Each structure stands twice: as structure tokens, then as C-alpha cells.
Image (cartoon, rainbow, N blue to C red):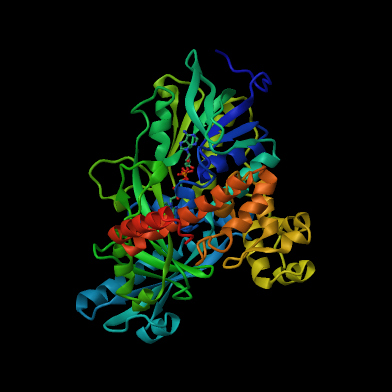
Amino acid sequence: MSIRANDRSYDCDVVIIGGGVNGTGLARDLSLRGLRTLLVERNDLAFGASGNSSGMIHGGPRYLTTHPSVTRSSCEDSGNIQRIAPHMIFRVPFVWPIYGQSFFDRLRFEAYDAFFAVYDQYQPLKRGKRHARLTPDEALKVVPGLVSDKLLGAMTFDEWGINGARLCNANALDAREHGGSVLLHTSVEKVLIEDGVATGVRVRDRLTGETRDISARAVVNATGAWSPITAGFAGLEGRVKVRPGKGVHLMLDRPITDVAVMCEAIDGRSIFIEPWENTSLIGTTDDDTYANLDALPVTSDEVRYLVQGIERVLPRVREARIIGTTVGARPTLYAWGKLEDALSREHEVLDHARDGVKNLWSMIGGKLASYRQFAEEAADLVAPALGVGARCTTHTAPLPGGDAIVDVETLAARFDISHYAALRLVGRHGTRAERVLAEGGKAGRLVACTTEPVLAAEVRYVVTHEGARTLQDVARRTNLAYGPCGGAECALTAALIAGELLGWSAAEVRAQAIDLIMARKRSRLPAIGTAQARSELVIDATLRGLGAVA
Ligand SMILES: Cc1cc2nc3c(=O)[nH]c(=O)nc-3n(C[C@H](O)[C@H](O)[C@H](O)COP(=O)(O)OP(=O)(O)OC[C@H]3O[C@@H](n4cnc5c(N)ncnc54)[C@H](O)[C@@H]3O)c2cc1C
């Protein structure tokens, strides 16, 4: 079957399966090159690894000795992402305390110094600062509360953070604004193939149950850890292999330090605690997983493992409350026999012409930090195959909201909102914050979630402009209910606002609020121990059965 350029008899040029950072990044890249893209996401944008990562747009110093190419590409793309999305990124200075007084410990300290001196060479690629050696006194000043016993000193290094969910949304929004379409809560169930050429997909809307076929000139599988399953929908069982690595984070109710602190867990793995807006993030685990990727479990053992590791250097971590956990599966490239941490974080585009299906590709592996480059590499294969010679522009064209730096104070004064609300809004939407507020009108300035804070206008905006279809979608885009109240204060108010736009009945508004509060609750339960959590759930259910309100 021959492929004709600009053939309007197809519903779109390229179907991209998966709304993580790689799928949304590719949708944006191809849309900017003039192709008609359709992104299909089974859950919500950033539902998978991309919305549950550590959010480091970093160079990955940990890959420096094993995969220096990953460090270089991550640093390069970190520099690009900073240019196109300046509103989303924030500096994360790391402190790595080194303990012990033996000759070997001193040698280790010198080795770390030498290691970070090499990493310094990559820092200019991402506007990073050079590392510094800290004396014990200096380290204790920078990180008050750090265990001082046998502290030899500390190393610093410099990284950048980003909100993965916002990054996916910005890419998808830009794809839409350049002629692309996005279907959320819609699962690809089959890749349509005619005469050895991929010609579209069969999709099912998981909220309405509606099934339909969509024709396309090419299909890309960008489903991360799900990609072997998706390849099976094209009859390519066993042709795409990844080794999903489950990673868990804990979110605390307060910042414990002003800087991120690295330390070792009981098994010698590096873990960290970092300040994240008005909370702290502790991460992460890395374990092979064979679980259902749509419902990855977090166990109380994983919570204990992370808290135990941090407590050894920062005992006051115990004073904080765990207000949530996150979990995602890294789509790590397949290898047998290696420990999870040692697996390559490189990426690959597989052309399934080698398996007898033309115009079908799979994107596997990679990192949040190098998503743009990965998308560019994939688009460089897909676009020419469809007769389009346009070059990539995603490294220079700003993402929506990233075209200028917003003065938060002026915005707050102009719309009569708090500095804090304006700051968060600008962090999520950049220059689009003004549009969010202008379209929301006076009623939009109502604070829908006090702990975060999220304005009614933003709830409306993510429904009307970012395709949110459920209250959990709204929360993923805005941080609503991710604070200490876990949705108890805001879920119903937000459901009423979203429901007005989405045509929800009163019963649906209530169901959406319950869904969000339950999801937040489930994410906290491992923190109180699985057995205790199970018992509390049974008691809750019994109380409800007896007619208790609370
Ligand atoms: C705990 C953790 C920490 C990490 N930390 C970092 C970090 O700090 N820095 C960094 O650079 N990288 C980090 N990573 C790695 C990074 O997050 C991933 O490499 C990246 O997000 C993968 O993106 P993706 O789009 O390929 O996959 P995903 O984000 O997982 O997206 C795949 C999507 O496909 C959808 N899907 C699946 N099946 C179907 C179907 N049949 N139809 C439609 N849609 C479907 C899923 O719902 C999902 O949304 C981390 C990963 C984890 C898990």
C-alpha cells in the first residue's frame, strides 16, 4: 500500500499512543512540523511515569560513570527545556553529606570531589553552578538539623526541577494549538494494519464505552512501561521489551530543608529529600515490577525504607506528616541480570518495518530530562516517512506560557489575588496565567483549594483549555487536594465548578469529589502501615454501614 502525502482521506497523519512526556513531546514536535497529530491517552496526561517522577531536569550525575552519553544528552536538553519553559523550572541545589573518619572515608570524599569536578564540565549546558566542598560547619549551616556525628564534610551540586504533569500538559496544549487533537481516557485497543502498513487504531472511550476506528498514515507507540502490551495490539508480541522499574516517592506536609539532601538507604542506594513548593519530596525506590501498571501498589515497606534512609541524616523527618505517596514505572530498556539501578536510561526508537509492519514505531526508554531530544529523534524518522521535510523547532519555540517572564507582584495586584496564589499560577501557566484570570472573571478569584492554593479560574481553565474530564484530572493539573487537607476542604467546591462546565448531575459531582478524596486517601494509607490501613478501612465501612456521617 502506498502512502500519499497530505492525504485528507485519513482522519489524521499520525496517531500517537500515550500521553506521557514522550508522547506529548512527539505530538508537539510533529504538529509544529505541520503534521495532523492525534494523541490518544488511556488514562490522563502524565498518569504514568511522567507525572510521578522526581521531576529532575538534570544531567543525571549517577549515569556519568556508566552511561555518560545519558548525562550529556540530559544536560543539553535541560538547557533547551529551560529556554522554552522558564516559568516551570526551579533550581534545586543538592547537598551530599559524607560521613566517617577513616582513611577510606577521606579517600571517598576526595573521589566524590573529583567526580563532581567532571560533572562540572557539563554544567554550562544547563546553566548549572559548579560543585563546592563544604566543611562540616558549612554543611550544618546550609542544612540545619543534619546529623553532625562523624560528618566529614559535604559536596554540593546543582540541578533543576520541573512539574512533570505541567510539562506534559504544555506539550499537549501546544500540539492542539498547532492543529493536533488529544483524546483522554481513551484506550487504543488495536493497531489497524493493511498490507503490512499501520493505517490507524481502534479506540475505546473508557468513560462512555464508545468504540471507533481512526485512520492515520502512521502510528507511534509511546506508552512507556506499557509499550510491550501496546505492541501486542499490533500483533507484535515479544517484539518490544522494557524492564519496568517501580519508583515510589513520599510527600511530606512541610519543607524539612531549604536544599535537597542526598543520602544512602540501607542497601547503599542513593536516595534524596528535596523541598517541593510548600512540601518535601522523598525519593525514590527502584524495583522490578510485574504489577498492573494502571494500579501500581505502594507498600508500607517502601515507605519505611525511604524514611529510614533519610532519618539517618535528618532525624527531624519524623516530625513531619506524610500527606501522599506517588508511584510510577520507569520504562527502562530491557536487560537481563543487572540490578535495577544499573540499567541504562538511554532511549531507542524501534521501527517496526523490521517486524513486517511499516509506518509503526515504538519509543522506549529515556528520561523526563531528555524527552524533547527523544521526541525530535522520533519525529526525524516519522516526518520524512510521510513526505514532510520540515525540521524540528521545539528547542527554540517556547511552550505555551514560556514566551516571557511574568512579574508575579504586578499580576497579583492587577487581579487582586494573593501573591502566593499568583506565584503558583505563574509556575503552572507562565504568561497564560493572565488569560486564566481574565477568562475566570471576578468569580474566578475564589480560592477553590486553600492549602495549595488553587483558584476557581484555574479549575475552569484546565477543563476548558486542557481537556480535564474528571476531578482527578483537574487535581493532576493544578495540585488541588495535594496539600495537607487531602481534598477534604476543596473537593466538593472544585467538583461543583468543574461539573458546571462538564454537565455533571448532583450525584456525579458528589461521586467525583468522593473519587478524588479516596484517591488521596489511598495514597496516604501505606504511610500508616498496610495492616493498620486495612483495619481503618474496615472500620470506616462499618461506620458508614451504621449510617455514621463521618
Ligand atoms: C519514580 C520515578 C522517578 C523518575 N525521576 C526522573 C527524574 O527525576 N528525571 C528524569 O529525567 N526522569 C525521571 N524518571 C523517568 C521518566 O519519568 C520517564 O522516563 C518518562 O516519564 C517516561 O515517559 P513516557 O512518556 O515514555 O511514559 P509514561 O509517562 O509512563 O506515559 C505512558 C502513557 O501511556 C498511556 N497508555 C498506556 N497504554 C495505553 C493505551 N493502550 N492507549 C492509550 N494510552 C496508553 C499510559 O496511561 C501513560 O500515561 C523517573 C521515573 C520514575 C518512575
Residue 266, placed above or below residue 399: below
Task: Tell me the residue at 62%/25% (across/down).
Answer: 387
Residue 60 in view of the camera: no
Task: Tell me the residue at 48%/24% (across/down).
Answer: 191
Query: Where's the N terminus, which quadrant?
Result: top right
Residue 323, placed above or below residue 290: below
Tell me if 114 is positioned left or right of 367 in this view.
left
Tell me if 298 is positioned left or right of 260 in this view.
left
Residue 509 is situated, as x and y percent measured from the top left of the image, at 60, 49
Residue 339 in view of the camera: yes
**Residue 180 position by quadrant:** top right
Tell me if 91 is positioned left or right of 262 in this view.
right
Tell which residue pokes out farthest to the front in this image.
546
Task: Tell me the residue at 65%/50% (across/down).
Answer: 498
**Observer-nearest of 111 and 166:** 166
Q: How many marks?
A: 0
**Residue 4 position by quadrant:** top right
Residue 32 is situated, as x and y percent measured from the top left of the image, at 66, 39
Residue 42 is situated, as x and y percent measured from the top left of the image, at 50, 37
Residue 104 is situated, as x and y percent measured from the top left of the image, at 21, 74
**Observer-nearest of 214 and 448:** 448
